[in-house]
């Protein structure tokens, strides 16, 4: 069964600093990988996704993520954080085979941004 | 506007009183899913559906029922709610496995 680990529960960065949120997954084959963002009191918004092709994927709001098969990781990055990026971020893995629609989420990383 | 609509947004009920949370999508998506979100636990999948009349259990299906009689609707049914089902619930839909889910705005349920 697939699983997702986000090692950092809470991260604080200064506005303008770079950001990297970690995500490690466990799955037997190459899964579908996603990053979502949830602002306070809101639903989840898809930032980016990966299945195959270029291992560096670009998303919305200036985010990017890099798939590293050897490390089973899919870390999210942003070169310069804005105060509006403060939110909770979720990594998710979906099975490329087997049960379709079964999308597993990590427990999330809460991002705080210092002025 | 393409969206997933859940109702109600907020609900307070008593233990044992059957309730239904509705979910509807207007994007002709094949896949639909229900999640619950609890502090420190992230999102956990309750049930999902790959098409009309095709559903499967997620990680936490106990105490919940679903049905998919029409493509656009995927209601979540709590036959006998208990306080441990107090949570924030999200419905989501997706065109395909790899396209990612579009989420509704959530339903905050309190069972007393």
Image (spheres, coloured by chain):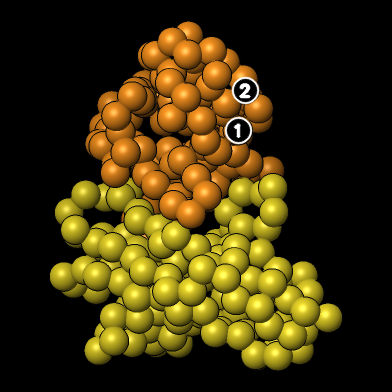
Chain colours: A yellow, B orange
Picture quarter with the N terminus of chain B? top right
Kindly indicate whether the residue at mark 2 contacts the one at mark 1 (C-beta within 8 angstroms): yes
The outermost residue toward the right is: A115
Residue displayed at 31% across by 71% down: A25
Protein chain holding label 2: B
- Vertical side of B10 occupied by A24: above or below: below
Name which of mark 1 and mark 2 comes first in the sequence.
Answer: 2
In percent of the image, x 42 and y 74: which residue is there?
Answer: A7
Q: Quadrant of the C terminus of chain B?
A: top right
A14 to the left or right of B107: right
Residue located beneath label 1 in the image = B108
Q: Residues within 10 Å of mark 1 (few under 14, many from 20)?
A: some
Q: Which sits in the foreground, A51 or A34?
A: A34
The answer to which image quadrant residue B48 occupies is top left
| Count of numbered circles in the view | 2
The location of residue B19, given as percent across then percent down, is: 49, 15
Q: Is residue A21 left or right of A73 when viewed as pictured?
A: right
Q: Quadrant of residue B8?
A: top right
Q: Please state the horizontal and vertical placement of residue A47, each as a whole percent of the image.
A: 56, 68
| Label at residue B18 | none
Label 2: few (<14), some or many (≥20) within 10 Å? some
Above or below: residue B66 compared with residue A92: above
Please identify the residue farthest to the top as the structure is shown.
B17
Residue to which mark 2 is pinned? B11
Identify the residue at horizontal 42%, vertical 70% (top origin): A6
Disc 2 is placed on an element classified as strand
């Amino acid at each position: 069964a697939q699983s997702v680990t986000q090692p950092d529960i809470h991260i604080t960065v200064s506005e303008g600093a770079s950001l990297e949120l970690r995500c490690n997954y466990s799955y037997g084959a190459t899964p579908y990988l996603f990053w979502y963002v949830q602002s306070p009191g809101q639903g989840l918004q898809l930032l980016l996704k990966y299945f195959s092709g270029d291992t560096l994927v670009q998303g919305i709001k200036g985010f990017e993520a890099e798939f590293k098969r050897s490390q089973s990781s899919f870390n999210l990055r942003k070169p310069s954080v804005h105060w509006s990026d403060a939110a909770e971020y979720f990594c998710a893995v979906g099975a490329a085979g087997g049960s379709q629609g079964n999308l597993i989420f990590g427990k999330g990383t809460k991002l705080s941004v210092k002025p | 506007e393409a969206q997933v609509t859940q109702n109600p947004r907020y609900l307070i009920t008593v233990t044992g009183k059957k309730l239904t949370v509705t979910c509807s999508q207007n994007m002709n998506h094949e896949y639909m899913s229900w999640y619950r979100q609890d502090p420190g636990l992230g999102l956990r999948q309750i049930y999902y559906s790959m098409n009309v009349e095709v559903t499967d259990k997620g990680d936490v299906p106990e105490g919940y029922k679903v049905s998919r009689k029409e493509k656009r609707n995927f209601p979540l049914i709590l036959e006998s709610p208990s306080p441990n089902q107090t949570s924030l619930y999200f419905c989501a839909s997706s065109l395909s496995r790899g396209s990612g889910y579009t989420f509704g705005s959530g339903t905050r349920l309190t069972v007393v």
